[in-house]
Image: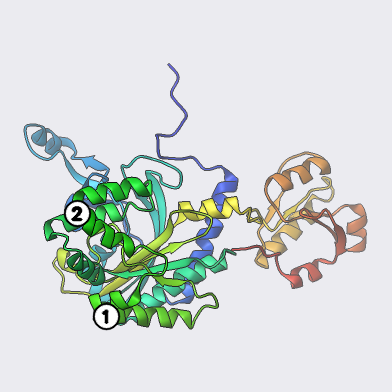
Amino acid sequence: MSIPTAPPSGFRDFLPEACARRARAIETISRVYRSFGFSPIATPAVEGLEVLLGKAGDENEKLIFKILKRGEKLEEARAGGELADLGLRFDLTLPLARFYVRHQGQLPQPFKAFQIGPVWRAERAQKGRYREFYQCDADILGSESLLCEVEVIQAITSAFLALGLEQPTVLLNDRALLEALFDMAAVPKNLRAQACVLLDKLDKTERQAVLAELGELVGPQALGFLESLMAEEPDESRLSAAAREAFRRLGEIREALLGLFPKPAFRLSPCLVRGFDYYTGTVFEFRHPSLPISIGGGGRYDRLAESFGGPRVPACGGSIGLERLMLILEESDRGGWGPHACVTVFSEELRGRSLKVAAQLRQAGWEADLYAGTGRLKAQFKYADARGARLALVIGPEEAALGKIKVKDLRTGQERLEALEALLAQGPPQAPGG
């Protein structure tokens, strides 16, 4: 019997080109986060179920990949009791809160952290939504200042721009404002959590189906009130009257951001929820015109550390969804994801010269792929093109005699002779996110 070679549903293999694209995107995002003073951290893929179930909400319990107990503990559990004690993390925020409570005494205050890694959710796979996917998080813990929201949103927006993408639209809301609007719509308190779950599905499920389900839950009058707030430009006087302090906070955040970016792409969205119930204040999402769903989001979660036995710690963070980001980058045909140059090997006699050129390029910060096969130049150019390289470098007898390199631009087909020193002085060719 043959063993299937396809990965499980919702999981993927990545070919070299896709891996290279993802690696460059992660490198760019990491560089931008570091430029804002965020420090890298890492947490394990596996957490205790008490960590994962502590504050994420009933809806998210269904999404956890649970891990069975081992050995004698599993045998004891089979007789009655919980069979699992661990689970794969479904986001990076809960592990961060646990990490912070454990290591707080060793960390600067406030603490600016970033973490990029895979998470897992046992949900139905669809375009842009997989069971295994990467998140790129930036968080600030230990400060109540609205500068936290501004810094996180600015860092994430700057990462998109560094990748060569159009500036995203940022939707802003506050949980206190949403609660006040529920009060005005006379939505019973015992139905609000379920109403939030439905509102959070608006960019994931057919809109009319969600609104129909919401209407059945809260009634036509409340639905009409809430739907009137879903306009692109909601009535801000109504929002201010509903929750003056929350509206003021949102206004300050928006004004600060408008002063930092040329495009006025920051707007209030009073029915924006964000799915996790650990959010306590501001929430935000990033939207790009090429996708109908969010490509990132976050918010303030001032009480999450308390669930791990720590003191109240104000915190705010945001995340980029790497899978959705890659959809945009691939569909917009952002090139230059291969090495800067492929160095060809003209002949056995000139192999040493090619080895030396490749080494010098690497020392100067280039990504230089030395051809390791035995094919002729035509095959080597084909290899360089398949690798997505920007340049192919040839050191044949004529070039060696002149002390120069033939440089072929694989995008345009143009060729030129260059001295190695001049090539090094120019630096590696750049591409969006490179």
Q: Nearer the viewer, residue 260 or 351?
A: 260
Residue 111 percent across, percent down from the top left: 32, 76
Q: Is residue 107 visible?
A: no
Residue to which mark 2 is pinned: 218
Q: Pick the quarter of the image with the N terminus.
A: top left
Q: Pick the quarter of the image with the C terminus.
A: bottom right
Residue 281 percent across, percent down from the top left: 26, 71
Question: Farthest residue toward the left?
Answer: 80
Instruction: Please name the amino acid that badge 1 sits on.
Output: Glu
The residue under the point 29% across, 51% down is: 89
**Image quarter of residue 72:** top left
Q: CA distance from mark 2 to mark 1?
A: 34 Å
Residue 261 percent across, percent down from the top left: 52, 78
Residue 83 higher or lower than 352, as above or below = above
Q: Nearer the viewer, residue 284 or 121?
A: 284
Q: Is residue 205 left or right of residue 409?
A: left
Q: Is residue 34 visible?
A: yes
Residue 144 is labelled as 1
Task: Tell me the crowding category of disc 2: few under 14, some 14 to 19, or many 20 or more residues within 10 angstroms, Cα based.
Answer: some
Residue 321 higher or lower than 8, as above or below = below
The residue under the point 56% across, 47% down is: 18
Residue 140 percent across, percent down from the top left: 33, 74
Q: Which tag is nearer the camera, tag 2 or tag 1?
A: 2
**Image quarter of residue 164:** bottom right
